[in-house]
Amino acid sequence: GVLIYVGKSVNIRHRIQQHLGTAKTVRAGEMRSRIADISYEITGSELIALLVETEEIKKSKPVFNRAGRRSGNQIGLFTYENGDGYICLMVKRMNSTDGMPLSTFTNSDESRMFLDRLMEKYDLCQTLCNLYTSGGACFHYEIKKCFGACIGEEPADTYNTRAQKAIDSIGLSTKSFLLFDKGRNNTEKSVVKVVNGKLIGYGFFDPNSVDGNISLLDDLLIACSDNRDAQQIIRSFLAKARPGSVIYLNAESPAD
Protein backbone atom coordinates (compact mmCIF):
# COMPACT_ATOMS: atom_id res chain seq x y z
CA GLY A 1 0.00 0.00 0.00
CA VAL A 2 3.00 2.36 -0.03
CA LEU A 3 3.39 4.47 -3.14
CA ILE A 4 6.98 4.03 -4.38
CA TYR A 5 6.92 5.58 -7.88
CA VAL A 6 4.78 7.91 -10.02
CA GLY A 7 5.32 8.39 -13.75
CA LYS A 8 3.46 9.52 -16.85
CA SER A 9 3.40 8.39 -20.46
CA VAL A 10 1.20 8.35 -23.55
CA ASN A 11 1.72 4.55 -23.50
CA ILE A 12 1.69 3.10 -19.97
CA ARG A 13 2.47 -0.44 -21.12
CA HIS A 14 5.58 0.74 -22.96
CA ARG A 15 6.74 2.84 -20.01
CA ILE A 16 6.36 -0.07 -17.58
CA GLN A 17 8.40 -2.27 -19.92
CA GLN A 18 11.09 0.41 -20.02
CA HIS A 19 11.29 0.58 -16.23
CA LEU A 20 10.95 -3.10 -15.44
CA GLY A 21 11.42 -5.27 -18.50
CA THR A 22 14.65 -4.27 -20.19
CA ALA A 23 16.38 -2.04 -17.63
CA LYS A 24 19.43 -3.70 -16.05
CA THR A 25 20.29 -1.05 -13.45
CA VAL A 26 20.41 -1.58 -9.71
CA ARG A 27 17.55 0.91 -9.34
CA ALA A 28 15.35 -1.06 -11.76
CA GLY A 29 16.11 -4.29 -9.95
CA GLU A 30 15.24 -2.76 -6.58
CA MET A 31 12.00 -1.33 -7.97
CA ARG A 32 11.02 -4.71 -9.42
CA SER A 33 11.61 -6.42 -6.08
CA ARG A 34 9.38 -3.97 -4.18
CA ILE A 35 6.36 -3.76 -6.50
CA ALA A 36 3.13 -5.32 -5.26
CA ASP A 37 0.66 -3.54 -7.52
CA ILE A 38 0.57 -1.15 -10.48
CA SER A 39 -2.34 1.18 -11.23
CA TYR A 40 -2.95 3.95 -13.72
CA GLU A 41 -5.21 6.93 -14.27
CA ILE A 42 -6.18 8.42 -17.63
CA THR A 43 -5.74 12.20 -17.70
CA GLY A 44 -6.31 12.94 -21.37
CA SER A 45 -3.74 15.73 -21.65
CA GLU A 46 -0.08 16.26 -20.79
CA LEU A 47 -1.01 19.35 -18.77
CA ILE A 48 -3.23 17.41 -16.38
CA ALA A 49 -0.78 14.49 -16.30
CA LEU A 50 2.04 16.80 -15.17
CA LEU A 51 -0.12 18.42 -12.49
CA VAL A 52 -1.29 15.05 -11.15
CA GLU A 53 2.26 13.71 -11.22
CA THR A 54 3.77 16.60 -9.26
CA GLU A 55 0.84 16.55 -6.79
CA GLU A 56 1.30 12.84 -6.03
CA ILE A 57 5.09 13.12 -5.76
CA LYS A 58 4.97 16.00 -3.31
CA LYS A 59 2.17 14.40 -1.28
CA SER A 60 3.55 10.85 -1.01
CA LYS A 61 7.29 11.44 -1.61
CA PRO A 62 7.83 8.14 -3.46
CA VAL A 63 11.30 6.72 -2.89
CA PHE A 64 11.98 6.26 -6.63
CA ASN A 65 10.96 9.83 -7.56
CA ARG A 66 14.12 11.36 -6.13
CA ALA A 67 14.29 14.21 -8.65
CA GLY A 68 10.69 15.25 -8.04
CA ARG A 69 11.15 15.19 -4.28
CA ARG A 70 14.31 17.26 -4.36
CA SER A 71 14.09 20.78 -2.96
CA GLY A 72 16.45 23.61 -2.09
CA ASN A 73 18.64 23.26 -5.20
CA GLN A 74 16.66 25.36 -7.65
CA ILE A 75 17.19 29.02 -8.43
CA GLY A 76 14.23 31.37 -8.26
CA LEU A 77 13.42 34.95 -9.23
CA PHE A 78 11.73 36.87 -6.41
CA THR A 79 10.34 40.38 -5.96
CA TYR A 80 10.12 42.69 -2.96
CA GLU A 81 9.82 46.40 -2.16
CA ASN A 82 12.81 48.16 -0.59
CA GLY A 83 12.71 50.79 2.13
CA ASP A 84 12.43 53.61 -0.40
CA GLY A 85 9.35 52.11 -2.07
CA TYR A 86 11.05 50.74 -5.19
CA ILE A 87 10.11 47.30 -6.55
CA CYS A 88 13.20 45.12 -6.57
CA LEU A 89 14.03 41.81 -8.24
CA MET A 90 16.40 39.20 -6.87
CA VAL A 91 17.68 35.87 -8.14
CA LYS A 92 18.57 33.46 -5.35
CA ARG A 93 18.83 29.78 -4.53
CA MET A 94 15.50 28.69 -3.11
CA ASN A 95 14.83 26.97 0.19
CA SER A 96 11.76 25.65 1.98
CA THR A 97 11.02 29.00 3.68
CA ASP A 98 10.82 31.02 0.45
CA GLY A 99 7.51 32.06 -1.01
CA MET A 100 6.41 31.46 -4.60
CA PRO A 101 9.03 32.64 -7.13
CA LEU A 102 8.13 34.53 -10.28
CA SER A 103 10.13 31.97 -12.25
CA THR A 104 12.65 29.18 -11.69
CA PHE A 105 15.92 28.26 -13.36
CA THR A 106 18.25 25.29 -13.50
CA ASN A 107 21.47 27.26 -13.06
CA SER A 108 22.83 30.74 -12.32
CA ASP A 109 23.85 31.45 -15.92
CA GLU A 110 20.30 30.85 -17.13
CA SER A 111 18.85 33.08 -14.42
CA ARG A 112 21.36 35.89 -15.11
CA MET A 113 20.62 35.84 -18.85
CA PHE A 114 16.87 35.97 -18.17
CA LEU A 115 17.20 38.88 -15.75
CA ASP A 116 19.52 40.75 -18.13
CA ARG A 117 16.92 40.47 -20.92
CA LEU A 118 14.18 41.64 -18.59
CA MET A 119 16.28 44.57 -17.43
CA GLU A 120 17.02 45.63 -21.00
CA LYS A 121 13.43 45.34 -22.20
CA TYR A 122 11.87 47.32 -19.34
CA ASP A 123 14.77 49.71 -18.55
CA LEU A 124 15.19 48.37 -15.06
CA CYS A 125 17.94 49.45 -12.69
CA GLN A 126 20.90 47.10 -12.09
CA THR A 127 21.00 47.98 -8.41
CA LEU A 128 17.28 47.30 -7.92
CA CYS A 129 17.75 43.98 -9.74
CA ASN A 130 20.55 43.12 -7.29
CA LEU A 131 23.10 42.93 -10.09
CA TYR A 132 25.15 45.95 -8.96
CA THR A 133 26.17 46.35 -5.33
CA SER A 134 29.03 48.86 -5.38
CA GLY A 135 26.89 51.71 -4.06
CA GLY A 136 25.92 54.94 -5.77
CA ALA A 137 24.72 55.00 -9.35
CA CYS A 138 24.74 51.71 -11.23
CA PHE A 139 26.79 51.18 -14.39
CA HIS A 140 23.69 51.36 -16.60
CA TYR A 141 23.03 54.88 -15.26
CA GLU A 142 26.50 55.90 -16.43
CA ILE A 143 25.76 54.69 -19.98
CA LYS A 144 22.22 56.20 -20.00
CA LYS A 145 20.34 52.86 -19.76
CA CYS A 146 19.05 53.53 -16.23
CA PHE A 147 16.96 56.60 -15.37
CA GLY A 148 18.45 57.01 -11.89
CA ALA A 149 16.22 54.94 -9.61
CA CYS A 150 19.40 53.68 -7.92
CA ILE A 151 20.18 57.20 -6.65
CA GLY A 152 16.59 58.40 -6.18
CA GLU A 153 16.64 60.47 -9.34
CA GLU A 154 13.69 58.60 -10.89
CA PRO A 155 10.55 58.59 -8.68
CA ALA A 156 9.50 55.21 -7.28
CA ASP A 157 6.02 55.32 -8.83
CA THR A 158 7.44 55.91 -12.31
CA TYR A 159 9.99 53.13 -11.97
CA ASN A 160 7.51 50.74 -10.37
CA THR A 161 5.15 51.03 -13.34
CA ARG A 162 7.81 49.47 -15.57
CA ALA A 163 8.89 46.98 -12.93
CA GLN A 164 5.32 45.76 -12.51
CA LYS A 165 4.97 45.32 -16.27
CA ALA A 166 8.11 43.20 -16.18
CA ILE A 167 6.69 41.08 -13.36
CA ASP A 168 3.37 40.65 -15.13
CA SER A 169 5.16 39.46 -18.25
CA ILE A 170 6.81 36.47 -16.55
CA GLY A 171 4.63 35.21 -13.74
CA LEU A 172 1.02 34.27 -13.16
CA SER A 173 1.03 37.37 -10.93
CA THR A 174 -2.59 38.19 -10.01
CA LYS A 175 -4.09 36.73 -13.18
CA SER A 176 -7.28 34.68 -13.01
CA PHE A 177 -8.07 32.38 -15.91
CA LEU A 178 -9.32 29.04 -17.17
CA LEU A 179 -6.91 26.98 -19.28
CA PHE A 180 -8.59 24.37 -21.47
CA ASP A 181 -7.10 21.25 -23.03
CA LYS A 182 -8.09 17.82 -24.32
CA GLY A 183 -10.19 15.50 -22.18
CA ARG A 184 -10.00 11.77 -21.52
CA ASN A 185 -12.13 11.00 -24.57
CA ASN A 186 -13.52 12.74 -27.65
CA THR A 187 -16.65 14.02 -25.87
CA GLU A 188 -15.01 15.97 -23.06
CA LYS A 189 -12.42 18.64 -22.34
CA SER A 190 -10.16 19.35 -19.39
CA VAL A 191 -9.83 22.65 -17.54
CA VAL A 192 -7.36 24.15 -15.08
CA LYS A 193 -8.46 27.11 -12.96
CA VAL A 194 -6.14 29.80 -11.57
CA VAL A 195 -7.44 32.62 -9.37
CA ASN A 196 -5.26 35.62 -8.48
CA GLY A 197 -2.18 33.69 -9.59
CA LYS A 198 -2.99 30.66 -7.42
CA LEU A 199 -3.78 27.20 -8.80
CA ILE A 200 -7.25 26.12 -7.62
CA GLY A 201 -7.69 22.78 -9.35
CA TYR A 202 -8.45 20.87 -12.52
CA GLY A 203 -11.41 18.96 -13.88
CA PHE A 204 -13.13 17.35 -16.84
CA PHE A 205 -16.41 18.34 -18.46
CA ASP A 206 -18.72 17.76 -21.40
CA PRO A 207 -18.84 21.05 -23.36
CA ASN A 208 -22.49 20.41 -24.25
CA SER A 209 -23.49 20.17 -20.58
CA VAL A 210 -21.89 23.52 -19.72
CA ASP A 211 -23.35 25.33 -22.73
CA GLY A 212 -21.20 28.44 -22.26
CA ASN A 213 -21.87 28.83 -18.51
CA ILE A 214 -18.32 28.58 -17.17
CA SER A 215 -19.50 29.03 -13.56
CA LEU A 216 -20.73 25.43 -13.70
CA LEU A 217 -17.11 24.25 -13.96
CA ASP A 218 -16.40 25.11 -10.31
CA ASP A 219 -18.40 22.09 -9.12
CA LEU A 220 -16.29 19.78 -11.29
CA LEU A 221 -12.86 20.87 -10.09
CA ILE A 222 -10.51 18.54 -8.24
CA ALA A 223 -8.47 20.58 -5.78
CA CYS A 224 -4.67 20.39 -6.03
CA SER A 225 -1.75 22.08 -4.33
CA ASP A 226 -0.37 25.40 -5.51
CA ASN A 227 3.41 24.96 -5.52
CA ARG A 228 6.34 26.25 -7.55
CA ASP A 229 6.47 23.17 -9.79
CA ALA A 230 2.75 23.38 -10.61
CA GLN A 231 3.12 27.09 -11.32
CA GLN A 232 6.02 26.42 -13.67
CA ILE A 233 3.97 23.78 -15.52
CA ILE A 234 1.05 26.18 -15.96
CA ARG A 235 3.31 29.03 -17.10
CA SER A 236 4.82 26.76 -19.72
CA PHE A 237 1.46 25.68 -21.12
CA LEU A 238 0.04 29.18 -20.91
CA ALA A 239 2.92 30.49 -23.03
CA LYS A 240 2.12 28.03 -25.84
CA ALA A 241 -1.68 27.90 -25.44
CA ARG A 242 -3.68 27.73 -28.65
CA PRO A 243 -6.05 30.60 -29.52
CA GLY A 244 -9.35 30.18 -27.68
CA SER A 245 -7.94 27.79 -25.06
CA VAL A 246 -7.62 30.48 -22.35
CA ILE A 247 -10.43 32.53 -20.82
CA TYR A 248 -9.23 35.35 -18.56
CA LEU A 249 -11.47 36.12 -15.62
CA ASN A 250 -9.90 39.47 -14.76
CA ALA A 251 -11.53 42.67 -15.93
CA GLU A 252 -8.36 43.71 -17.75
CA SER A 253 -6.52 41.87 -20.50
CA PRO A 254 -3.24 40.19 -19.54
CA ALA A 255 -0.07 42.24 -19.90
CA ASP A 256 1.87 41.88 -23.14
Image: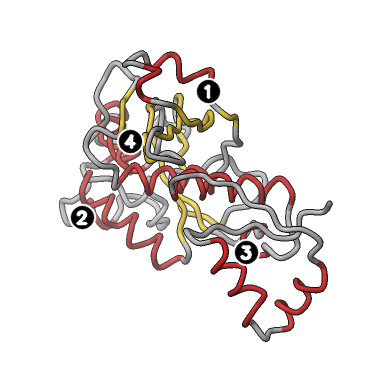
Q: Residue at x 51, y 50 (%)?
A: 50
Q: Please, what is the three-letter code of the amino acid marked with disc 4?
A: Asp
Q: Quadrant of the C terminus?
A: top left
Tell me the quarter of the picture where residue 154 sits: top left
Work out how far the residue at label 2 is from the one at label 3, CA to CA, in angstroms: 44 Å
Q: Which residue is mark 3?
A: 67
Work out how far the residue at label 4 is from the one at label 2, CA to CA, in angstroms: 28 Å
Are the residues tagged 2 and 3 within 8 Å (C-beta)?
no
Q: Earlier in the sequence, mark 4 or mark 3?
A: 3
> Is residue 165 shown above or below 57?
above
Work out how far the residue at label 4 is from the one at label 3, CA to CA, in angstroms: 29 Å
Tag shown at residue 220: 1
Task: Give the secondary structure at mark 1.
Answer: helix
Task: Give the secondary structure at mark 4.
Answer: helix
Q: Please, what is the three-letter code of the amino acid marked with disc 2?
A: Glu
Callout 1 crowding tier (Cα within 10 Å): few <14, some 14–19, many ≥20 = few
Q: Residue furthest left?
A: 144
Q: Is residue 4 left or right of residue 71?
A: right
Q: Residue at x 35, y 50 (%)?
A: 136
Callout 3 crowding tier (Cα within 10 Å): few <14, some 14–19, many ≥20 = few
> Is residue 104 shown above or below 19?
above
Query: Picture coordinates of residue 148 (x, y %)?
Result: 25, 42
Q: Which residue is mark 2?
A: 142
Callout 4 crowding tier (Cα within 10 Å): few <14, some 14–19, many ≥20 = some
Q: Earlier in the sequence, mark 1 or mark 2?
A: 2
Q: Please, what is the three-letter code of the amino acid marked with disc 1?
A: Leu
> Is residue 68 shown above or below 230?
below
Work out how far the residue at label 1 is from the one at label 2, CA to CA, in angstroms: 56 Å
